Amino acid sequence: MTSASHTWTLAIDFGTSNSAAAHSGATSGSIEALSLSHTSHLMPSAVFVDNPNNILVGAAAVNAAAQNPAGFIASPKRLIGHQDGVSANGHTVPTYALVSAVMRTIIGRGLAAHAGVMPERVVLTHPEAWAPQQIQVLVDAAMAAGIPRERITTISEPRAAAGHYSRSHALQHGARIAVFDFGGGTLDIAVLEVTTTNTFQVIAARGDNGLGGKNFDALLQRWVEDRIADRDPDHATWLRRTAPIDAIQSLQNSIQQAKELLSEAPSATITVPGPGDRTTLQITRDEFDELIAPAVDSAVQLTRATLIDAGLTSPDQLLALYLTGGSSRIPLIQQRLGELGPVATLDDPKTVVAQGALLQVLADSAPTQPRPVPAAADLMPSWNTQPRTLVNPQAQTATPQRWWKRLAAAAVAAAAVLAVVVTVIATRGGDDTPDGPQASNATETLARNTDAKEAWPTGEDGGSILTDEEQARAQLPTALQNQLVGDCRRMMGTSNGAGKWNCDINPDGSLAEFARKPNDFYISFNVDINEANREILNYRNGFWAKSYPEGQTALVEDSARTAAAEIIPEVRDDPQYGYTIYYANPKSGVVMTVNRVKDIDSARTFLNRSGLID
């Protein structure tokens, strides 16, 4: 039995790009950020699936991806609520297991700091807008990592951040603060009010799942490629088309380091690998500010809209605008947000959510009960009426990780549901509407679409993919090809081994009228037959749309039902920020994303005029 002197609590902030944790200190008992490496309180949330018995996390996952990108998943958090399982390196793994691998490592760090004693409580943070089913994935992940169900508590990220702010500020009943959480992959904003019981009530919240520090990295990479093209076109072509994965990763690491340095210094140096010698470029903070200004404008507009939702129309109505997340360190962001209210930053903005979560739980004198979660039957999607035939029967023979067996009896039903859902996602084929033709299973669908692709490379899942840009672009409709300008930018490939590219759309062309900002209008695409089949089923089943109120999304299909697209708002409940198009065509294998389209009607017309949907 654990003695009182060894009782401790752990909080885990599982992030889109990075994760952080806090614990009650082993010696002082005070709340401290937990060291997750020899040099940092953060770890990448990325995972690498070597096999179902070996999932690497953090820096080890990023390192493994350079040799074998097929097993790499950069952000498992983005899967929660959209995919219950994912195919990586030829294996299908439940989403909760990917999250659990990260949590297991964090818990291990905590155990090392507390002489191997398990925490009495574990607090998990989550976005304010998450549904109970999404929170359940975090709970399942913690249980799979060995934490008993009764020790798990959950709290929303803005409530946790507000708790950290209140640690050093006396707050009166009715006081309002805003939390601006700007991380690597997402932006979340919430306005909270202090209640009569000195707790926080969220009175307004908005977010943008497509805006974060990664956007700034992409803008910097484009800036680098443009400068290199001016100096040495052959070098630029090498970067965009033939550079090995480790060279691309090295460039992206240098870009990220330069971005972070620009928050403290007037200039930074970016090292650019080449086929021969390396090249260095210097960028000033003023140049960086000019690059990111449109994205910062979007963040400020979203913040202003959230404040208006809360009934706040002047800066003096807000006690503080509290900044969290690594991207909030950027001086231009702090300067612009100062127009809306008094900006407050404390300690390391990357760890305040984890520390605040711990504060909130420890401040509660009453026994903390886990947040209610749905019963196993409630987790079943409405379309899931019975199991379907597996596309790859061998997937059933994979040996589960030994630590998965630690699940307590309370999680068995939920885990079984997740396993069934993974099977359905991987295998479901044919039409999902009553008036459409029904394929007997997904294997038949794949066979029809891959007969002409036998000469293509084979992905980790055995399906046809493309790794060559020229071949991949040839799969795009001619009308769209004719509107692409310049060289496409080669990104890190997909987890299945396919190449992936970002291509600019002509800002003066016939498709530019459908963009919110024609000068920043581009497509991201890859070619993967099996992924296209999975995605088109996801669209028809509303995997994106189910997270939005009715009427905010649209499903578009061609007349032959061989291609489909889901049109989703960039920002929930606020169409002024535009829409994202998610597109898949199993016949050509094209899987595509188009961001920042004006509205649903513009998206429909774009799909038609570009030849993506007839």
Image (spheres, helix red, strand yellow):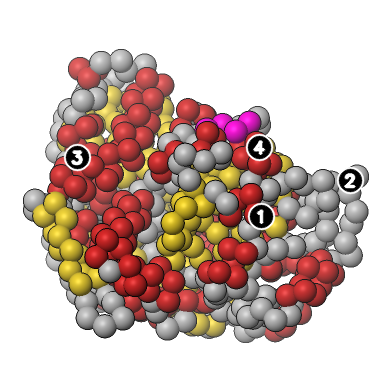
Comparing marks 2 and 1, which lies closer to the viewer? 1
Under mark 4, the amino acid is: Arg
Residue located beneath label 3 in the image: 332
In the image, residue 181 lies at what x, y percent? 32, 43
Comparing marks 1 and 3, which lies closer to the viewer? 1
Under mark 2, the amino acid is: Pro
Label drawn at residue 434: 2
Comparing marks 2 and 4, which lies closer to the viewer? 4
Query: Toward which corner of the image does residue 66 lie, by quadrant?
Result: bottom left
- Comparing 189 with 567, the one in front is 567
Mark 1 or mark 3: which comes first in sequence? Answer: 3
In the image, residue 540 lies at what x, y percent? 73, 49
Q: Residue at x 81, y 66 (%)?
A: 445
Q: Which quadrant: the N terminus? A: bottom left
Under mark 3, the amino acid is: Leu
- Does the image show residue 277? yes
Q: Residue at x 8, y 51 (%)?
A: 266
Label drawn at residue 600: none
In the image, residue 576 lies at what x, y percent? 47, 28
Find the distance from the CA under tag 3 to the CA under tag 4.
36 Å
Q: Residue at x 55, y 59 (%)?
A: 525
Residue located beneath label 4 in the image: 604
Residue 601 located within the stretch drawn in magenta: yes
